Image (cartoon, rainbow, N blue to C red):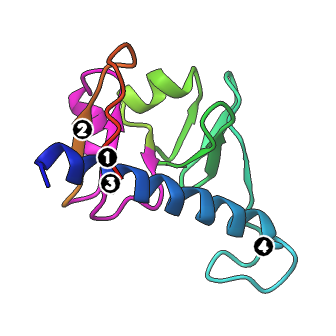
Amino acid sequence: MTVFEKIFKAIRAQSILIMNIADKLQELEIGKGGGGGGGGNATISDYESGKRYKRNTLVVDPSTETVYRVLPSEYTSVTVVSDKENGYLKLVGFESDIVTFDHNPSQAEIDALPDDSVVVIYSPTDVPYIPDT
């Protein structure tokens, strides 16, 4: 098996894992009493441009269904892309996993990733690689 086949399989497995996590998160009734350390008032909401966010707020990019955690103590959002590039948003659930970008990541984006992350840069115009199964 080539290295590209291994990367493709890992990315595919991570995609399925992320979809499963997203499904499980939607099933949870977060904010209805008692939850873990946050006093039960944690919510995950769709990201909105021009909104004021506080540290540790969880937001979902509605176009990709990717969950991010807000890093600054407080800031006003611009766009998901610019907020990631400026290091204001950190991917949730990517500890020791492969993270893909469709552009060259900025230093702030790299700094916002957990340790032991593998970064894969791809072009959406590339012909997809589909291994023989």
Type of amino acid at the residue the image marks with label 4: Leu
Task: Name the spot of residue 49 as percent of width and height, x first.
Answer: 67, 23
Q: Nearer the viewer, residue 51 or 64?
A: 64
Per the rendering, the mark at residue 60 is none
Name the secondary structure under disc 2: strand
Residue range highlighted in magenta:
90-115
Q: Is residue 100 magenta?
A: yes
Specify few, some or many for label 3: CA neighbours under 10 Å numbering under 14, 14-19, or 20 or more: some
Type of amino acid at the residue the image marks with label 3: Lys
**CA separation, marks 2 and 3?**
13 Å
Query: What residue is drawn where x is 57% and y is 20%?
Result: 78
Vertical placement of 34 versus 90: above or below? below
Task: Name the spot of residue 57 as percent of width and height, x first.
Answer: 61, 53
Tell me which label, 4 or 2, sits earlier in the chain: 4
Specify few, some or many for label 2: CA neighbours under 10 Å numbering under 14, 14-19, or 20 or more: some
Name the secondary structure under disc 4: loop
The residue singled out by tag 2 in the image is 120
The residue singled out by tag 4 in the image is 28
Q: Residue furthest right?
A: 32
Q: Are marks 4 and 2 in contact (CB under 8 Å)?
A: no
Query: What residue is drawn where x is 61% and y is 81%?
Result: 37
Tell me which label, 3 or 4, sits earlier in the chain: 3
**CA separation, marks 3 and 4?**
29 Å
Q: Residue furthest left?
A: 2
Specify few, some or many for label 1: CA neighbours under 10 Å numbering under 14, 14-19, or 20 or more: few
Tell me which label, 3 or 1, sits earlier in the chain: 3
The residue singled out by tag 1 in the image is 132
Type of amino acid at the residue the image marks with label 2: Val
Q: Is residue 109 magenta?
A: yes
The residue singled out by tag 3 in the image is 9
Query: What residue is drawn where x is 27% and y is 64%?
Result: 96
